[in-house]
Amino acid sequence: MAKLSQKSYDTSAMVYRLKNSFLTPFILSFLGGTLYAFGFPSIITKSPLPFLPIIGYLIFFAQLSFLNTFEGKENFNENKKSYDFSHWFLFSLGYNLIGYYWIPNFLTEFGEISGFLNFFTSIIFSFILLPQVFIFIALFKIKFLKKMIFKIQPDLRIILFSIGLVFLEYYSPQQFPAHLGHPWLGLSPYLGMAPIFGAPAFSFFSFWLVFSFLPLFRKEKIKNFLPLSLFFIFLLLNFLFKIPPIGEEKGSIKNLNVRLVQANIGNFMKLDSESGKPHSILSVTQRYFKLSTQPLNSQPDLIVWPETSYPLLLSSSKMKENKNAIPIVIRTVASKMQSEVFFGGYDRVSNKINRGYKSEYNSAFLVSKEGSFKNVYHKHRLIPFGEGLPFGPLNPFLSRYIKNISFFAEGKNFPLFKTSNQSSFISAICYEILFSSFIRKYLNKVQDNPHFLINLTNDSWYGDTIEPFQHLFLSHWRAIEFNLPIIRMTNTGISSILLPDGSEQKRTDVFKQVSKDYKFKYNSERQPTFFQKWGLLPLCLIVALLFLIQKVLLTINKKKHIQFRKEKPALRRS
């Protein structure tokens, strides 16, 4: 019994020391970051856990000095140390180590960085993963802004905090945007509000719930239940207005037979072929030819190859003028299969003679059944440290010495591709599909409403990691937000067709050579969604209305409180 009491005492003492330790808040911030990572496919599980990121953010925000009291009085003491940026880094580090453990593999394969420098660089990525949180904290280091905001009543302030973070998520520059609203994808097809408000609305209600629960960390009671009530109303609306599958919506439903060719070309062979090695070029083109022309169950209307699948430099300007400028393997596949071919490759900038700084585009080409050129798309949003450097005027100088970065030119045009059966589509290459604002801009630039989108990518640089699953997971939001089916074609997997109700046709396995035919349905009368037309405006109007409702409720409560104080002396006398 004495031993048991001693153990109980030791445990209690340890808990007390941990609770009062200087390091505990920093440990909690790190824990918050790891919980945030579990909202997406991660090293632990490929299935996202939708509401864990809300808990992660709640734990993190509870550690920040300017948020641990909504009155804000003690925070104006300039002598008090603030470790807010340290908490932000640890939150990002936890998120990085669980969610982005594949970065070292990418640095080794793509950037040829290894050893300690590889590990150190991957940790440095923690500084750029969540720029929206960094900017949010930085704004509160501006004294006059901090004082002005903390003069606003707390219940109104958290609405401003929430919509502010949504804008920072949406507009701050990011390489791999994974936002607080995205894990809601796990509830599909019960995401009826997504085509109206987009993923930002799901972030807003999540942030609002987080800020409304912060008083619990200060051992205070929650006095305002409006955020919690509206969170569940928003959740209920998504269930009530379930997104219908294709075929149950209004419009004419048409079929397209699509063949996805996942060649699984290894990085060594890919780089060898791109450098002009004849044996590797032959191996790559023969593999694509064999997979594209093998007999399967149906006759494809469209054959799709992944990003940069054709290894040699092409010239779209010459391809337009002369059919023979199109690679013979592409023309042969088109002729033999009587199918159009959509493939990724490199397109020469028309006024450039030699390969060098911004002399070529990362491109997607469409070739007709007859083997003639139809159209080309040039990638707009390039990957920093892979397809260019973010150093502006220094880039031409740096390109002379840094040889393992491509330094592509940025595309300017927004082409609409049309097939022989009058289906139309747009294209996005690699991570472009992750940027809602970019896809919305593209959709609003083309004259006609495309029926679907083809996303060409190459995830081979990330190895056998969770990155392909994360890339696919986040891509699916574009299908839901814009009611736009997505054909996702990759070199090493995952290749699939993502549907607007959140479902997915059977996907390919990673690191497998496979040629798979899909009978793909699309709505030939597809109309732009509310989110495509108006972007964040509908959400801003809703937030303004919520702000007004909260203001009215506070005014009513204040009047009741004043009236009660006036009546209290009379009650005492009676």
Image (cartoon, rainbow, N blue to C red):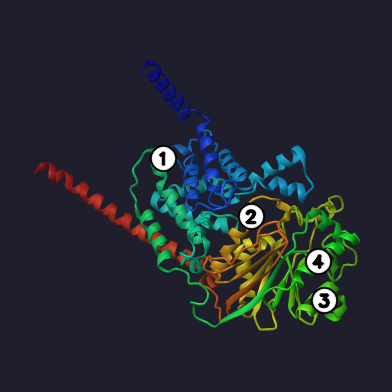
The residue located at (88%, 58%) in the rendering is 275
Mark found first going from the N terminus, 3 or 4:
4
In this figure, which residue is indicated by the disc labeled 4?
A: 310
Residue plotted at (59% across, 64% down):
436
**Measured from the top left, where is residue 526 in percent x and y?**
56, 78
> Which numbered dot is residue 263?
none
Viewer-closest of 508 and 370 = 508
Query: Which residue does the numbered mark 1 point to in the structure image?
Result: 217
Label 3 or label 1, whichever lies nearer to me, is: 3
Q: Is residue 525 above or below residue 8?
A: below
* Residue 147 seen in this snapshot: yes
What is the three-letter code of the residue carrying label 3?
Thr
The amino acid pointed to by label 4 is Tyr
Residue assigned mark 3: 332
Q: Check disc 2 and report its element: helix, strand or loop.
A: loop
- Crowding at dot 1, Cα within 10 Å, few <14 / some 14-19 / many 20+, comes out as some
Camera-near label (4 vs 1) is 4
Label 2 amino acid?
Phe
Q: Nearer the viewer, residue 499 or 212?
A: 499
The quadrant in which residue 369 appears is bottom right
